[in-house]
Image: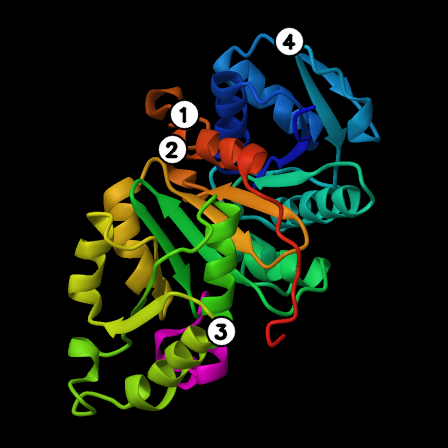
Amino acid sequence: MSRLILITQGDPGGIGPEAALRAYLAYRPQRAVFVGDINVIKYAMRLINANLRIHTVENPSDGIFDGTTLNLVNVTVAGQYEKRMPTKEGGLLSGRCIEKAVELILSGEGEALVTAPISKEALKLAGIPYPGHTEMLAALTHTENFAMMLVGGSLRVMLVTIHEALSNVPHLITKDRVLKTLILANTAGYMLGIDSPKIAVSALNPHAGEAGLFGREEIVEIVPAIEEAARMGIAATGPFPADTLFYKAYRGQVDIVVAMYHDQGLIPLKMAAFESGVNITVGLPIIRTSPDHGTAYDIAYNLKSAVNPQSMCEAMRLAETLRPYAPINLYD
């Protein structure tokens, strides 16, 4: 039997509901249940002329999986959701959909999670104290060691730091943090079907620090982490200057790149696979994927700017096919 995936609708003011519905119609996952507000879903269905019957359920396993039915766990909050902008109500609904989906999966009512885009600003307006999906999911699943991996085309990129101010990044590049990321990257390779992935580590500084002339993070923190990972049997090499490393990765010479910070890793990936990139949270006790794009308020609910569902389709495909991840003691 195919894996049962739960799909959160994302921010109701953005493209999440439309992207999720278009992907559902295009990809046709065998067993999927939406988690969202029935009125938002109905509006998005009318917008794209989706010929589906809505079947509301409390338990996803009670869904009707016949290809013509959209199964839905209905989640609502008080107030109106404004379109094409972040709002407190939209943030509250986004957060509650995520909470409900995680609760269902942890109770056995689902086997994987696909999350449509949310707004960090809307979460803040709603008083939800997380900078994004990744950190919220880690808290909800009581996960301490986790990392964000982006997959797009020939590139697979994992980040040592995620949603951090650039000024904070150098202080966060520690041997321990880099080593944990390398271990998780090795696990991510397994999840993707690569049993012994070749992992290349990016430097933080230009020219990999030029032997300390441009910074000592490579010498003091990154190299010791790579050496420790190698002693654990992980095929990690580096650190390499980022301006040349991604060219090698794009040509398939390495399996996974470990980048030091958000934009260092995601600019090349989005350049290569903007419409098909997928975000995987590695380290959680559940499978979670999402499209690698945001709420795109500027094109939401506008048929003249029809949403491309390719990234969401890829997120659904990976949610169905990734190998399950079993949490491990990082230092066994």
Confirm whether the magenta stretch covers residue 171.
yes
Residue corresponding to mark 3: 232
Closer to us: mark 2 or mark 4? 4
Vertical arrangement, residue 143 with respect to residue 211, above or below: above
Q: Which residues are magenta?
A: 161-178
Which element is circle 4 on?
loop
Q: Secondary structure at mark 3?
A: loop
Residue linked to disc 1: 302
User: Badge 4 is on which residue?
Assistant: 68
Mark earlier in primary sequence (3, 1): 3
Query: Which tag, 4 or 1, sits closer to the chain's start?
Result: 4
Q: Is residue 150 above or below residue 111?
A: below
CA–CA distance in space, label 4 to label 1: 25 Å
Instruction: Using a 10 Å C-alpha cutoff, classify the residue at mark 4 as few (fewer than 14 neighbours), some (14 to 19) or many (20 or more).
Output: some
Tell me which label, 2 or 4, sits earlier in the chain: 4
CA gap between label 2 and label 4 equals 27 Å
**Is residue 24 rendered to the left or right of residue 202?**
right
Which residue is label 2 attached to?
A: 299
